[in-house]
Image (cartoon, rainbow, N blue to C red):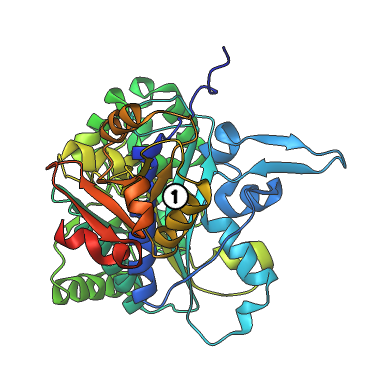
Amino acid sequence: MTNAPKGTKDLMPKETALFRYLENEFLKVASSYGYNEIMTPVIEYTELFSRGVGSGTDIVQKEMYTFKDLGGRSISLRPEGTAGVARAYVQSGELSKAKPVKYSYVSSCFRYEKPQSGRQRMFHQLGIECFGSKEVQADAEVIMLASDFLNNIGLKEITLKINSIGCNKCREKYKEALVKYYESVSENLCETCKIRLNTNPMRLLDCKEDECTKYSSDAPSILDFICSECANDFSKLQELLTDAGIQYEVDPRIVRGLDYYNKTAFEFIHENIGAKATVCGGGRYDNLINTLAGIEEPGIGFGIGLERLMLAIDSENIDKSISTSPEYVIIPAGENVPYEKIYAIAKMLRNSGKTVVVDIMNRNFKSLIKYANKINAKYALILGEDELKNEAVTVKNMASGDQKTVKISELVNSQETI
């Protein structure tokens, strides 16, 4: 028996129903803010991520699924959503549209990571990207959208943490101070952070290893190094979030793991889903389009891990059970019921939006009643000779046992009275 590859997970019908519910709720909220859904390929040229995400990041160096196609080109499965959406934005010509340009998406992503709770090698990301506005109001709107969605699906134990990681000028001075601080304790850091100290020192603040987290609280704060413009923007963001009634915490350790971020960085944290407690993370990336295409174009967005979201819902015992049971099972009473009539009734109900099961196992009447109970069907539609003569069916409520005869022409609305 062949099992699913390590780090992947089958979503069975009930989990898939929850997945689709979350996907649809997210796209509905995004649409209410003026974001339009976009779909991009699951494969991209590797250069897109090495340039956009950053050649020195863990994602590019250790986690991407990369291969040569038959033409010898280096191709990678997307490890995150933003770079591909940014590429599509430029390539499609929508760069010339009226600003801002707003996209929403649902993407499958792939990273070669150690599988654990809330972290799989194949995962799904809900995201939005907003291009063309450098104003702080765009940052606030993006955070408000994420907050609205998380509130709408009923999550209570969520904390919003925000930070400013400054601009390129701010970060150079900060990195110098950070390296100086960590060099004094470098022998005690995990092996990954020893490498990061020379390649991407800000990522040390994001490390979840026990031997490293104890040092991050005493590390220099980026907020002591940001320039007046970045400080003013961050102050304005806090005012806007307060005006919107959104609670938040300022956390200088929120740095995000990708090179393209600048200024605003934020995460929505859920502490009950393990070490990787971030269910939503995002920020501003004013240099990404310039890095990819040599065009100055600001942007901001976020990504939500859908599988982590499902864990968070489960941890709070939120009832999101979505029925996968049919509304009707059609049960012929006797051998002389023509399938032409069964199919006609099923089609009529399906066309009105109902779920209908027709037996394809050649069961007898008694077995079909048992089957309807096992699959939790709401109603059994019993069709015998008497019903055929009267152009009717007997509708049985499977929960109460109540039943009555209903004309086939009136069947669509009849369940409300049974």
| Of 30 and 253, the residue lying toward us | 30
**Can you tell which quarter of the image residue 23 is in?**
bottom left
Question: Which one is nearer the viewer's eye here, 365 or 23?
Answer: 365
Which part of the image, by quadrant, shows the C terminus? bottom left
Q: What residue is drawn where x is 17% and y is 45%?
A: 319
Q: Residue furthest bottom?
A: 98
In this view, the residue in front, 355 or 256, is 355
The three-letter amino acid code for the residue at tag 1 is Gln
Residue corresponding to mark 1: 125
Q: In the image, is 7 to the left or to the right of 49?
A: left
Mark 1, Cα crowd under 10 Å, few <14 / some 14-19 / many 20+, is many
- Residue nearest the observer in this picture, 25 or 327: 327
Q: Is residue 278 visible?
A: yes
- The answer to whether any part of residue 217 appears in the image is no
Left or right: 388, with 416 as reference point: right
Per the image, label 1 sits on a secondary structure element best described as strand
Relative to residue 74, is residue 39 drawn left or right? Answer: left
Please report the residue visible at 36 percent of the width from the left and 24 percent of the height from the top.
189
Residue positioned 40% across, 78% down in the render: 34
Image: 171 above or below 116? below
Q: Residue at x 47, y 81 (%)?
A: 100
Question: In the picture shown, does residue 120 fall above or below 301?
Answer: above
Q: Does 133 appear above or below 18?
A: below
Q: Position of residue 201 (x, y in %)?
A: 43, 41
Which residue is situated farthest in the right direction here? 71
Of the 4 image quadrants, the one containing the N terminus is top right
Query: Which image quarter: residue 263?
Result: bottom left
- Location of residue 3 in the rendering, given as x and y in whole percent from the top left corner: 53, 18
Instruction: Provide residue 254's location: percent of width, then percent of height.
Output: 31, 49
